[in-house]
Image (spheres, helix red, strand yellow):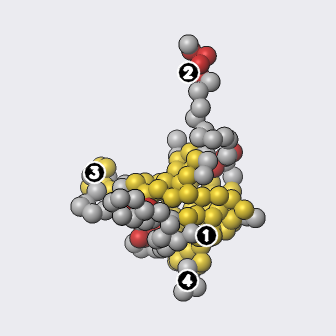
Amino acid sequence: MLAALLGGCTHNNGDIGSKFGSWKQTAMTIDGEPNPEYQGNIFWGFQHGSLTFTYMFYDHGIPVNPPTGEPQLVFTSWSEEDGYIIIDTNFSDDQGTFRYTPPEVLLLPAQTAGIRLKIISESSREMRLEYVTSDGKRVVYTLHKWG
């Protein structure tokens, strides 16, 4: 029984390498300047084909329930191709699109397929991704492996 538990699947639909797992977004810059709106409270979760954004809310450093209407967990899909992570936020369900809309502070578009984030650098502990907005702003996300 112990062998069955230890051999259980932790990587949904296969191993995706060092990207698998939870990453804390430690920084975000827009055109080289820190984004004053970003509070260091978003985690990216990579599994095979699925990406989640977990938006943590704090009160004096203690995690709390989100304010009314704020999504705490957002679901998207992702793939990797030619040095880019490609995100798809074009989903809805019988309750609308809020579960699939990235936190506004990230400047990623909602209800859009083919959002391209260039992999600037990547190791097993840190990843830097670049997104160019529709109005030409260069956004860089710095992620650190969490846990």
Answer above or below: position of 137 versus 53. Answer: below
Q: Which residue is outermost to the front?
A: 94
User: Circle 2 sits in a helix, a strand or a loop, which is it?
Assistant: helix
Decide which of tag 3 and tag 4 comes sooner along the chain.
3
Q: Which residue is mark 3?
A: 64
The residue located at (61%, 47%) in the rendering is 48
Mark 1 or 2, nearer chain start: 2
Q: Residue at x 36, y 55 (%)?
A: 72
Q: Which numbered disc, 3 or 2, marks the residue closer to the eye?
A: 2
Q: Is residue 77 visible?
A: yes
In the image: residue 102, left or right of residue 63: right
C-alpha span from label 3 to label 4: 33 Å
Q: Amino acid at mark 1?
A: Gly
Q: Secondary structure at mark 3?
A: strand
Answer yes or no: do the residues labelled 4 and 1 have beta carbons within 8 Å? no
* Mark 4 or 1, nearer chain start: 1
Local crowd at mark 2 within 10 Å, few (<14), some, or many (≥20)? few
Q: Nearer the viewer, mark 1 or mark 2?
A: 1
Q: Earlier in the sequence, mark 3 or mark 2?
A: 2
Which amino acid, by three-letter code, is at mark 2?
Leu
Quote the CA–CA distance across marks 4 and 1.
13 Å
Q: Position of residue 105 (x, y in %)?
A: 42, 70
| Residue under numbered circle 2 | 5
Q: Name the residue that disc number 1 marks.
A: 114
| Image location (x, y in percent) of residue 140 | 58, 70
Please state which of residues 49 and 72 is positioned toward the viewer in this rendering.
Answer: 49
Question: Given this view, does label 1 or label 3 mark the residue nearer the observer?
Answer: 1
Q: Quadrant of residue 113?
A: bottom right
